[in-house]
Structures are given as structure tokens and as C-alpha cells.
Image: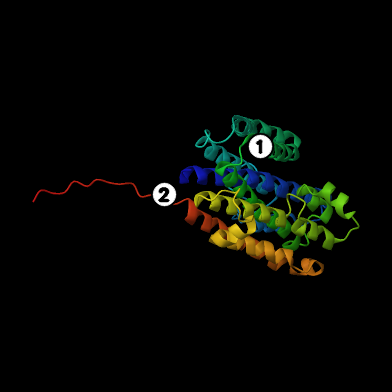
Amino acid sequence: MLSRIAESLFWLGRYVERADDTARVLDAFMHRLLDDPGTDEEAACRTLFAVLGVAVPATESGVCDAQTVLDVLAFDAREASSVVGAWQAAHDNARGVREVISTESWECLNATRLALPAQRRAAGRLGPYAYLRYVRERAALFSGLADSTMSRDDSWLFLTLGRSLERVDMTARLLSVKVLASPYAPDWVTLLRAAGADEPYRITESWGGDPQSAARFLVLDPGFPRSIVHALATAERCLADVADATTGRSSQGRVPRRSRGQALAPSATRIVGRMRTVLEYLDADTLVERLPTVLKELQEACLAASRQIADQYFQYGTPVVWLQGKDS
């Protein structure tokens, strides 16, 4: 596979997941403001910008409010971290790799991009919730189509790798809204609902108002696909399979998957595997106390792993340039 195709697939997976998770964070944030009108809106908005790593925009009034948050993080196509900006970036990456993704997946991306302006106009009349729900549903549709219509080859591996790393980062940021912005954060029920974990959590844990168990579920539950441990394990498997493919080793070989990954040991695999191991051996009873440190380490690990993946797989050869020498 060409490096540019692998890179486009990696970022396609990341941008669709970013649009989905940003919509989830915004939905939880807006519900919090609606449920508690006494919340310091400006402080909460500034905290949300900081958690998502976006600079607070300068406004004419100098006030940062919920409408400012929506204008930048939901509707600003120039901002790559916004919902519409991330979806546009996903579409742009997919356009260059249409030959390796399924037609259904491409049509989902394209139809959604074309429908977003109308959805935004509807949000102006009815509120942002239908807009955010539409993006979440379309992201889920794209992921389902990709998983059900793409062969498990390098294309699917890079797409899934990007999606998994972005999910780790964004789930950590979603939890940071709760941990770092305690006076303005949504309650655990709203947070679980924003992560798509409300019903799975109730089935697994039986909600009793214990924040410790809610945090454990979102971070440590190996069976929930949006948990951090599950996403790290998926990313680690993808890295091992990609490494096998690039060294000519078949996944049907005699060496077990874990041993193969350790033997090849790309830097990104070590980074992801280390974080997964740290979480698996973490004392679950003290997770909430250590959560700020754990979340910071997770975000740093995702950034480091992305850089290592780029260095290893997305390096382009320098074009050959013929220079005409001067006559002596």
C-alpha cells in the first residue's frame, strides 16, 4: 500500500471518530447547561475549549457563551476540531482513497457532508440536539458500513487504527470534562449517555450512583467497545497486523499474535501496549483519585503513538529532480 493511501485511511478513521466524539461532548455540555441554569456559563465554556485543545475565540462582546461554543466546535468548517470541520476533513481524505473503501462507505460520507448545511439551518430553529444526534448516527452508520463491507486488509487496519487512537484520546477528553471542570461538568449519568455507555453500563454494573464504577466502566471495561482499554487493545492488534504485513509475515503463521508484536516491537506498539498494560494492572478502587494523571498520560501516549506511526509508515520518498548542469 502506498504511504499516502495509508495516511489518508488513518486520518479518515480519526476524523470520523472526532466528529462523532465532539458531538457527544457538546451534547453532554449543552444538557448540563440546560439542566442547571445556575452554572457559570462562561467559565464552563472556557473550560470546554481548554479540554478540547481549541483556543477561545475573540468575540465582539468579549463574552464566551454556549452559542460561541456551538459556532466554533459544531459549525465552523475552518476548525478541524469542530464537528463539521472534522467531517469535511474525513470526506477530503476519503476522496483520495475511493478505490480502497467500499462504495457504501463513500456514499455515507458524501451524503452526510451535503446534508450538514441543512441540518445546521434546522439547528437554528430547533436547537443543536438534532444536529448533534444526526452526526452521531451518521458516524455510526459509516463505521458499520466500513466494518461490514471492507476486507480485513491493510486498508481496514489503518482505518481502524486511526479510529481507535482517536477514540482513546476523545474518551479521555470526555472524562476530563468531568474531572477537570467539576463545578460545571455533567453528572455521571449524562456523561455515560454522551459516551454511548448508559445502557451497557446499567446492564453490566446496575447503576447505584457510584462514580467509581462509572469511571471504571469507561476506562477499564474490556467488553465495551468505547472503553479506553478496549480501544487500546484494538489499536495494538492493528499495529501488530500491519507490522506483520510490512515484514511479509502472515497472520496465519505459527507465532502467536502477542509474541509477534513483541518481536517486531515498533515504537507505536510499545507505546500503546504499555498504556494498555498500565490500565489493566491499575488498582480499580483508586481509579477516580488517579484519573487526572491517567487521562493526561493517555493523551500524551496517543500523540506519541501517532507521531511514531507517521514516522514509520507515512514517509514519502523525495521526488527525483533532474538538474541541468552548466556547460564548462
Q: Residue at x 68, y 44 (%)?
A: 20
Residue 95 position, x and y percent, is 52, 35
Q: Residue furthest front?
A: 254
**Mark 1 Cα-neighbour bin, 10 Å: few <14, some 14–19, many ≥20:** many
Q: Disc 2 or 1, which lies upstream in sequence?
A: 1
The numbered mark at residue 316 is 2
Q: Residue at x 69, y 36 (%)?
A: 141
* Residue 41, quarter of the rendered image: bottom right
Does residue 171 show up?
yes
Determine whether 134 is above or below 185 in the image: above
**Mark 2 Cα-neighbour bin, 10 Å: few <14, some 14–19, many ≥20:** few
Q: Give the colouring mode of the picture.
A: rainbow
Between 308 and 65, the residue placed more toward the observer is: 308
Q: Secondary structure at mark 1?
A: helix
Q: Amino acid at mark 1?
A: Phe
Q: Is residue 253 left or right of residue 294?
A: left
Question: Which residue is disc 1 drawn over?
Answer: 142
Between 286 and 161, the residue placed more toward the observer is: 161
Q: Residue at x 78, y 61 (%)?
A: 183
Q: Residue furthest left?
A: 328
* Residue 291, quarter of the rendered image: bottom right
Residue 310 position, x and y percent, is 50, 54
Q: Is residue 189 left or right of residue 295?
A: right
Between 79 and 39, the residue placed more toward the observer is: 79
Between 141 and 46, the residue placed more toward the observer is: 141
Residue 252 position, x and y percent, is 61, 48
